[in-house]
Amino acid sequence: MADKGQKRDFGAWSSYVAIVVLVISFSVSLWRVYKVQEVEQADGVATIRVVHWQLEAGFREAFDDIARRFEKAYLAETGERVRIVQNAISERVYKQYVQTQGIGKTLPDLVQLGRDELGSVPRFFISNTEDVQKPNPYNKGTDLEDVPWMDTYLDGMLGSVDQTDLEYYGAASSTASTRLFYNADLLKEVFGDIEPPTEYRAFLDLCARFEQWAEEQGRGDLTPVAASKYQVSVFRAMRAATLFELMLENDRDFDGVFGQNDEVLLAYAAGDFDFHDPRIRADEMTIANLTQYFAPGFMAMDRMEAQFRFTQGKALFCASGSWDAMSFDSQVDFPMGILDFPFPTRDDPEFGQYVRGRISEADAPAVFRLAVSKFSKHPDLTLRFLQFLTSRENNQRFNQLSRWPPVIKGAKPHPLMEPFMRKPEGFWTAEVNRIIGAGPCAAAYSQAQWELVEHKVDFDGFADMLERDMPRAMAQEFERLLNNEWEERLAQEMSLSHQLGSYSFGDTWGEAAPIPERVQSKMVYLWEMRMRRYRNSYRLLEWQELLDAGEPKAQEIQQHIKIDLERKQS
């Protein structure tokens, strides 16, 4: 009975402690909110709010450092006070947050882009096309002083161009790449003082020998490569440029890209390639050869499970991006190394004849792109902060603190980031899913790839699955393309008719009369864009020629097409 009484007293005491801790925590939070609002609401203080989804270790602290530096610099320059407030939101709800806040016209001043905003950027954000063609004032005193802002970027600021209207929106602060992390202690324990292999076959051999060693030592908890479904996509950087010639051969519009869904459809239907192509085999098997050294059931694991296995010292290698490097570095208790992916060379006994070289990283993406919203109360000041953030000095400081690769020319990375700096040499290529198209085609590919990387089928079985499922999938995708562009063409014709009416009769509308110059500008733009909607005619003409020629693949796909093609051509 005494024991029960003591347990009851201890439980009650624990509850009181928990309540006290909760009250104290709540009070501290309220005090912090009050102090922040006190500063923001003070007379003469302009507040710039920034929203993003970067929750990685050290990132927010680095952003705060630059924000405080700008506040001091702006006060010294103008005598006026400004306050920068950041709000980090989980990726899971970020897209919905931006959409709802944009529709409600309550978006913060600066918003990170990169979550499928295609088409909505011109609606919610201010273009800075004219500004990027002028020098960044915060590069004064450097060799970039008279260089246009856009030309201070490693990628020429292409990452800030919106494909909807080809205008610049915002600016990025970092770049990103993927690399291979390894446990230096574990490598030394098993193989002695050696450097990790940089050649593809040697890397596979090392993984095989490590797996054998772990089995002999009774270390069933160890695996050569910590991986999940996420890492399968990361390891695609291990491929060589085996698809280079295949893609150029089928680039029908000569734009340097074999990624348009209609190009894939027409090339496949014409018999110009199939999924048994040895170049596709080389591309796919580069990864499939490696997945045999992943932990069993890796496709059912999530990204964090794989990374936890590595940071706990249970794996020799793990692939991830520069965004995870600082988190890894702070979590591991062993010396960690970083190296480039070993890829097949022209001497490779299996793939060598199809290898053209390494895949270039010249188009490595610029990330953490912030854009000024149309609902900002201080758009000029917000743009000024964005220029401050992307000057060489501050871009270097920000990325060294956050442990991300810088995006401005001449900005030096943190030593941890040196292995992640882009390597522009190499060949242009693309992900294999750009060879198979999108939508239903991508779904068919994903299903077949799952079977291949888990070694449930060999490559011929993988290719057979695609050859079986692609005709139906391509028919569905063809229908979607035709429907979408037919509807968009009708909508554009209606819009053009409206502008013509505005131009002809607008002067009779009284106070609601539109500005003639603006109407004329819209008419010119719509007329120029109108021709893009006639790609359907090209598709249908090519398609009819394939059917008339009796191409087997075209006829097989045609069996699954249910819409009236003649109506779509009219």
Image (cartoon, rainbow, N blue to C red):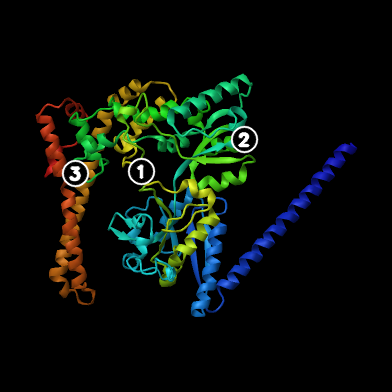
Question: Mark 3 highlights which residue?
Answer: 253
Kindly identify the amino acid type of the residue bearing the numbered disc 1. Ser
Q: Which mark is residue 297?
A: none
Picture coordinates of residue 11, whole percent (x, y): 80, 44
Left or right of 119 on screen, residue 508 = left
Q: Position of residue 257 (x, y in %)?
A: 26, 43
Amino acid, disc 3? Asp
Q: Residue at x 49, y 63 (%)?
A: 394
Q: Is residue 286 above or below residue 7?
A: above
Residue at horizontal 22%, vertical 35%? 265
Q: Can residue 120 be seen in the rendering of this structure? A: no
Binning the other alpha carbons within 10 Å of mark 2 as few (below 14), some (14 to 19) or many (20 upward) gives some
Could you tell me how far apart the alpha carbons at marks 3 and 1 are, in whole angstroms? 23 Å
Q: Quadrant of residue 568?
A: top left
Local SS, label 3: loop
Residue 463 coordinates in the image, percent (x, y) = 31, 24
Q: Secondary structure at mark 2?
A: helix
Task: Find disc 2 in the rendering and name its residue.
Answer: 185
The amino acid type found where label 2 is placed reads Asp
Q: State the image coordinates of residue 64 (x, y, percent, origin top left).
A: 55, 62
Quadrant of the image containing the N terminus: top right
How much space separates mark 1 and mark 2, taking CA atoms?
Answer: 31 Å
The span from disc 3 to disc 2 (Cα, nearest Å) is 52 Å
